[in-house]
Amino acid sequence: MITTTETYKCPGCGNALIFDAEKQQMLCSSCGNTYSVEDIRQLSQIDSDMSSGDGLEWQTYESDAWSSEESQRLHSYHCPSCGSEVMAEDSVAALNCVYCGNPLVLSDEFTGMAKPDGIVPFALMKEQAMEKLGGYLKGKMLLPSAFKTGNRIEEINGVYVPFWLFNCATDSDVTYKATRTRTRRRGDYMYTDTMHYRLRRGGNLSFADVPADASLKMDDTLMESIEPFKPSEGKEFTLPYLAGYSAQKADVGIDKCKPRVNARIKNSVEAALRGTISGYATVTQQNSAVRIQHGMVKQVMMPVWMLNTRFKEKDYTFAMNGQTGHFVGDLPCSFLKGAAWFLGIAGIPSLVSWLLMRNSGNSRFLPLVIILSLIAALVTVLVMRGKMKTVKKKKEASNYTVPGSFCLTRSQDIYLYTTTTRTRVANSSQRPGQRPGAHR
């Protein structure tokens, strides 16, 4: 309820509003905008609702303990080169580091890791990972020839990587600033009216098994790049699944993984709500409040093939999702090949155009052709270079939304005020050099 004793700020300029009792309106003495009492009441309620901010909290996870038999069958291995530490079943005779390829040394009996809730078995074998690498290298125009001919994969390792899987429902509110425009002409002037609005969208959206790798040594971006995983196809964890493979320790706690997962969930919720807005010239997000409900976390081991090679004194690591076959890895770029492609794309059209225009005696369009050729060459080479870099951070969790769970619960579009700009335009009947409005 609006009262004359309360202070409200103008949505347009932020100055205090004055209550006009006669017109039952709120007036801004600074910018001159007026608002209905009902609109100010709704805006005040929206600000109050949004003041609580995000509620991104998860329930504490408590893992099962390893049995004494399981602990005796597991051993810990340490890499003397890079410090990596993995675990493996006692049937494994030798292991190599998934990062640097060096042999691992048996350190002691396995300790210090929570027992996983589940495991997703390998669906693809080592030979298929090698085939994927060969296919991945094809079509990479900027790849140095020596990388293909002299390249030898030094190590390929199947490793189970621990992931925390986050499950939750969300209840969210987002507000936006939006505008619509219209133009009209009066005499020698064009007027542009810009209508300003405050929008609110709220809704529910659920997520299932949003992953975050729990291994300190594994690169987070590399693991996100081989998503999505399908944890629903997982099994109950038992030691026989580890036969012939190594496994990373879960040495990153839930609290350290929360910020990454929260950011992905928040971005996905905001994208879903933004998709419900249409009919506006501009839409700018203003405030956002994402509240997690029934947040639960579990640990599952995921299958990953790790491939390592060395080229010109630099290590290159590739990863393949052992469940889906999705393959990623950054590749070296040849400067000479890039330059050759650039010169070929830019130079050939320019040369042909120059020859044609020279014979015709009209070369006025040659500079334009050269500029367009240079732009086309630059864009092409940049696209080629982009294909060499496939390790990319995931910003959303759209692959893990529960189908049919999105529900729009709040939708408000409140008109605020209108601003008008005036631009002088030339009269079509006006002669060159004639002053607007002058007639003979």
Image: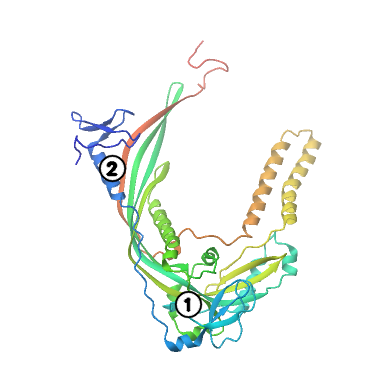
Q: Position of residue 326 (x, y in %)?
A: 56, 69
Nearer to me, 257 or 305 = 257
Nearer to me, 169 or 5 = 5
Crowd around label 1: few <14 · some 14–19 · many ≥20 (10 Å): many
CB-based contact (under 8 Å), mark 2 and mark 1: no
Q: Position of residue 95 (x, y in %)?
A: 60, 81
Counting residues from the start of the chain, the first of labels 2 and 1 encountered is: 2
Nearer to me, 168 or 383 = 168
Give the left or right position of residue 226, taking residue 11 as reference.
right
Residue 120 shows which numbered tag?
Answer: 1
Q: Position of residue 411 (x, y in %)?
A: 31, 49
Quadrant hosting residue 183: top left
Which residue type does callout 2 highlight? Answer: Leu
* x 46%, y 21%: residue: 188
Crowd around label 2: few <14 · some 14–19 · many ≥20 (10 Å): many
* x 39%, y 57%: residue: 269
Nearer to me, 99 or 21 = 99
Residue 43 shows which numbered tag?
Answer: 2
Which residue type does callout 1 highlight? Answer: Val
Classify the position of the N terminus by image quarter: top left
Q: Position of residue 187 (x, y in %)?
A: 44, 21
Give the left or right position of residue 217, taking residue 69 as reference.
right
Residue 7 vertical placement versus 190 (above, below): below
Residue 312 vertical placement versus 385 (above, below): below
